[in-house]
Every structure is written in C-alpha cells, then in structure tokens.
Amino acid sequence: MTSTIILICVIAYCILLFAVTRITSRGATNETYYVGNRSSKWYLVAYGMIGASLSGVTFISVPGAVGTANFGYFQVVLGYLIGYIIIAYVLLPVYYRLHLTSIYTYLQQRFGNYSYRTGAFFFILSRVVGASFRLYIVVNVLQTFVFDSLGAPFFVTVAVFLALILLYTYQGGVKTIVYTDTLQTTFMLLSVIISIVFIMQHLNLNISGVYDKITHSQYAQVFFTDWKMKSFFPKQFFGGMFIAIAMTGLDQEMMQKNISCKNIGEAQKNVLTFTFVLLLVNILFLILGALLYMYAADQSVPLLMKDGKIVSDNVFPTVALEHLGTVSGIFFIIGLISAAFPSADGALTALTSVFCIDFLGLKDNELKTEEEKKKIRYTVHFTFAAVLLVVIVVFKLINNDAVINNLFTWAGYTYGPLLGLYTFGLFTKKQVRDKYVPLICILSPIVCIILNDFSKELFNGYKFGFEMLIVNGAFTFLGLLCISTKEN
C-alpha cells in the first residue's frame, strides 16, 4: 500500500470530521463547551466512549501484546466490569447530586481548596501523560509507514495532527466530541472486524475454525496463577477494577461526557451499556491479536525485532498495510486515525475545562464577559496542545516498551492520589488538615516508585503489575488518615 493512498485516506477522513464539527458547533457557548448544555443523548455518549476509552493503545498494543501475554489482558477486562458498576452507582450519583461541571469541585466541598487544587493537578498530570502515550502510538505508526518516506520529521507529523484536533474542538467542546467520538468508534470497530475477516479468508477459516484454532494455540491462556508474575490473576483483576474507577470515574475527560447527559438515570444507562459493549470489543481485539500472529507464522511475515524480541506494537500495522491488500490497508488507516483523534480531542477539552474552572475560576467569574471568558479558554486550549506536542516528542526519544504497559504503569503513579482522595472522602466522615494534602499526594507516588524498583529484593521476587494503582491509593488514604481530625 503506497504512502499516497494512505495520505488520501487521512485527508478524506479529516474532511468528513470537519463536516460533522461544523454542524455540531453552531451557536456553541462556554456551557456547550464544558458540558454540552447537559443535553447529550445517553446512547451516543455510551457508544462514543468506546472509542475514547480504547483509543490507539487498544487498537495497536492489545493485539500486539497477545504474542507475549496471550489472552491475559482479559483478566483486566473482567476487573473493568466491576469498576464500571461502581462508577454507575457510587460516583455518578455524587456528581449529579452536587451538579458538578468539574468533578474535582467535590474535593473542595469535602476537604478544602488545597485538596481541590491537588486533585485537579493530578488529573492534568495524568491526562497529559496518558493522552501523549495514546496519541504517540498512532502517530508513530503513520510516521513509520507514511511520513518517513515523504521526508516529514516526527515533530511535524505530531504538530499537524494536534492542529487538526484543535480546529475541530476549540469551539464546540463536549457537544462536538460526543458526535465525533461516535463517528470514530464506528470506523475503529469496522477496521478491526474487516481485518479479522481478511485474515480468516487468508487462513481458510470460518468462525468455528477460528475458535478451534485459537483454543488449541499457545495464545489461549487467560488466567495466570504464579503470584510473582505481573500477570497473576488477582493483580490483573483488581488492578483492572481500580483502573476503571480511577481512569474513568475519577477522570474529568471521561466523566465530562457522562455528566453532559440529561439526568442520572440516562448517565447510568450510558455507563452500563458502555460496559457490556466494551467487554465484547476487547474480546474482538484479543481474537485479532491471536490471528495476527498465526497469519505471520503461516505466511512467514518478517516482523520487526528489537533486542531479540518482536516489537509488538508493529505487528498489526505490518500485517494490515503490507500483506493483506489495499482494502485492508485503507480500513486499517481509517481505524488508526479514528483511534488517534479520541486520544487527544477529549483530553484537550477536559484539560482546558479543569484549568479554566478549577485554577482560573472562569466559569463563575462575573467580572468577565462571555466573550472574554471564551478568549481565555481558547488560549488555554492551544497551550495544552503545545504541551502535548512536547511530551509526545520526548516520549518518542525514550520509549522502549509496549505503550499499553507504559500507560498503566504511569496510571498507577498519577491516578493513585486521586483514588486515595475520593475513597477517603466518600467512605469516611473525617476531615483533614487541608494544607498538608499536597504533601501526602506527592510522597505516595514517590514511595510507590521506590517499591516498584526494588520489589524483587524486598518481596522475594514479587513484581508489581497493575495493582500498583491500588497500593498508591492505599498509601494516600493512610497519609490522609494521619493528617485527619475528629471534626466531621
């Protein structure tokens, strides 16, 4: 598949995206930008959240990781199910009862301004790193297979993508993203299904044949029982549960779409529907991963190697673009860029919302006109785009692992303080000495980083996995308990 065809696909997709944006952003106000005027259809939010939740990480890294982790990722997905139920029936009622625009306002009402700013800061840190990881993996694939041959530097490729995202989000915000995420989810899932169908045809398999081939393959293992391994079932399951709670329920980007629904009932239907569909979609990605490696072995596909290991994030792009034909390649590119945009559009909107509301107090500032607020919002929006650009380029220089592992490792460090803060606030009646909260939330990740680096020596060969998020949250909780008071 030539770079010219790929470039045409990218341009055509962008034209379609901007057409949707133009329609949905008409008459947009600041309230439209922040919460979509609280009129979003729950089924559109649920469907669109699939693309926003999965992004390029799942699209590329989950199928690629099957080569080394088998179907072990499904242990994490099972944990997601419990996590999303907790979001629907514990967190959403709080957000709707308090009529929040930024979910971190809860921390202000519960503890005070230091806690409030600390929660907002850790969201900004988490989302900048997470969005950068997600966008990096997609842009890196396009760079390798398209823009390197055109002589475009990686920095320029990232800048162009972020500029496109800026153009379709700066005006309509959440209202626009609800619709563009729906479009992008559709193309992403279509790409995965078509890739599976093409591989089935090449291997002469029907649906029952795929089931038999996978269940009798080396990739079929789902549950792992070695307690020292990162893939040990309880680590993965409970890690997945708390990843869902922290990275969705305590994340302004994901919750901003949920609280844009008309009422709590519709928001809960949205989360439960999203949960069921997400389970099925992740199964599809794992099936695709097994088929990719089977196809590569059957057709003797030369896979990119580094330090004697297959570069897992390159397996899907290599097979789709170079071996399955032009049609498969076109749908792969469309699915890939559909995964790229939700990685950053919602992040930019949420980052802008949190900074404007939680740090600048812009929403309730009666001294500024609507137009003045809009200009400040534009400035913040563009500034965060520049920050993402820098972080992605830095990550390009240092990345040496599958992006999904990097993403969840960093999530354990940055979302842990949020998990501890909300758990303490929701499940105790204690007050804290507010001014010491930032110190607790900084020390907790530092302790966790040290524990992770020396876990083998300290714990008889034990390796931390996704459960590091739980450990981090527990340290934060204990720290808050130490600075708590008897005052309710």
Image (cartoon, rainbow, N blue to C red):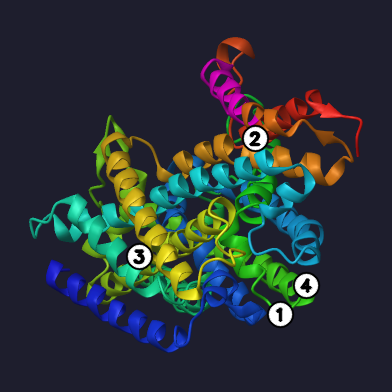
Q: Amino acid at mark 4?
A: Ile
Q: Amino acid at mark 2?
A: Glu
Numbered label attached to residue 467: 2
Between residues 478 and 325, which one lies in front from this camera angle? 478
- The residue under label 3 is 336
- The residue under label 4 is 264
The alpha-carbon separation of the residues under discs 3 and 1 comes to 32 Å
Numbered label attached to residue 63: none
Residue 150 quadrant: bottom left
Q: Is residue 116 above or below residue 160?
A: above
Residue pushed farthest front? 367
The alpha-carbon separation of the residues under discs 1 and 4 comes to 7 Å
Sequence-wise first label, 4 or 2 = 4
The alpha-carbon separation of the residues under discs 4 and 2 comes to 30 Å
Position in image of residue 317 (x %, y %): 30, 58
Sequence-wise first label, 3 or 1 = 1
Q: Amino acid at mark 1?
A: Lys
Magenta residues, start to end: 441-455
Q: Quadrant of the C terminus?
A: top right
The prevailing secondary structure element of the residues shown in magenta is: helix
- The residue under label 1 is 262
Q: Amino acid at mark 3?
A: Leu
| Left or right: 440 as drawn, with respect to 379 | right
Between residues 216 and 448, which one lies in front from this camera angle? 448
Marks 3 and 4: in contact by CB < 8 Å? no
Position in image of residue 328 (x %, y %): 30, 72
Crowding near the residue tagged with mark 3, few <14, some 14–19, many ≥20 C-alpha atoms within 10 Å: many
| Left or right: 37 as drawn, with respect to 142 | right
Residue shown at 81% from the left, 65% from the top: 97
